[in-house]
Amino acid sequence: MPAYLDYKFEDSPAFISTFDEMPLWSAYFGMLLLKHIELKQDLTVLDIGSGAGFPLLELAQRLGNTCTCYGLDPWVNANNRANEKIKNYAVSNVTVIEGSAEKIPFGDASIGLIVSNLGINNFSNPELVFKECARVLKPGGRLALTTNLNGHWQEFYDVFQTVLNETNNTLLIEKLTADQERRGTVASISSLFTDAGLKVTRSYTESFQMRFLDGSAFLNHYFVKLGWLASWKEIVPADKQEGVFIALEKNLNALAAKSGCLTLNVPMAFIEGERA
Ligand SMILES: C[S@@+](CC[C@H](N)C(=O)[O-])C[C@H]1O[C@@H](n2cnc3c(N)ncnc32)[C@H](O)[C@@H]1O
């Protein structure tokens, strides 16, 4: 009898402590990745920047037990949570490794597929990470990543720029532009593949919209504070932060009032490359 027929849902504090709906931000990108990656038997898969286990666990389950999956991330607490999910979901083909993609703990030509959902903007040395990926990929092996692109949340950045213009300090505008340009374009990310010796095989772009009632809701969202607020604050000198952020919130609220909510567009890409 197939083992899954014995499955019986058992509610427990341990189960619910790791049960969650798709995370707000990661889900869009993960779905794009899952839509396009090649599914094959007997793959050895590495998810770099696997965080709390998404899409690592989803991918491992979609591929099934002929495939062996590894997650690699230096973030100890996130790895612990991923391990709790592995245990509670009883997924047997995944192992999480604490470490950096700048020094991948696998031998040369040992991995068939490397994925990374939203990793690239977080690697301090992406060039080195791509070189490491090229080293550990088998000939014909693929690296597939998803990322937000330059232009994400443009509506927010336009309002931020208007507010900074009022400070008459061009340095602040330059810092804002640099913050936006930390997200690449399909061309700039493709160059990272080719510079590392990987041939770009496919790329797809899509965009999605995020709606918030207004700027106040947006700026107070826990994930916005966690993921972005620190880099926005760094743009503005400490003695100007309060005034700038009050004006920013007010202008975002005014923009939202015109159409009933604050709508932010997010361009994203799936890019895949292959080792010759
Ligand atoms: C935005 S999170 C994405 C996490 C997850 N893949 C998701 O889709 O939600 C970026 C992840 O990259 C990890 N990271 C940062 N530098 C890294 C490195 N050098 N090697 C591997 N992972 C890294 C972070 O710890 C974090 O978990």
Image (cartoon, rainbow, N blue to C red):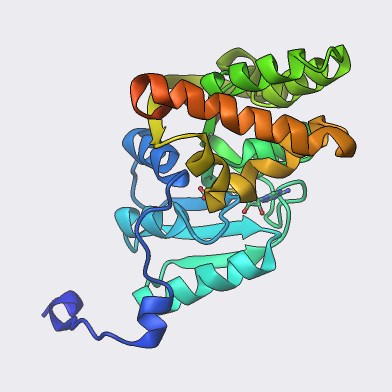
Task: Residue 242 in the image: state x and y as whole percent.
Answer: 76, 39
Camera-side residue: 241 or 84? 241
Q: Is residue 158 above or below residue 220?
A: above
Task: Residue 259 in the image: state x and y as whole percent.
Answer: 35, 21
Q: In this view, does 219 lie above or below 198?
A: below
Q: In this view, does 25 lie above or below 16?
A: above
Camera-side residue: 23 or 162? 162
Looking at the image, how many numbered discs can be counted on the residues? Answer: 0
- Please state if 141 lies on the left or on the right of 158 as rendered: left
Which residue is at 37% across, 56% downward?
Answer: 58
Residue 276 shows in this picture: no
Which residue is at 41% across, 84% downward?
Answer: 14
Camera-side residue: 45 or 55? 55
The part of the image, by quadrant, that contains residue 230 is: top right
Which residue is at 36% across, 77% downward?
Answer: 16
Which residue is at 33% across, 53% downward?
Answer: 63
Q: Quadrant of the C terminus?
A: top right
- Please state if 9 lies on the left or on the right of 271 as rendered: left
Task: Residue 80 in the image: state x and y as whole percent.
Answer: 59, 73
Q: Quadrant of the N terminus?
A: bottom left
Residue 186 shows in this picture: yes
Task: Residue 247 in the image: state x and y as whole percent.
Answer: 66, 28
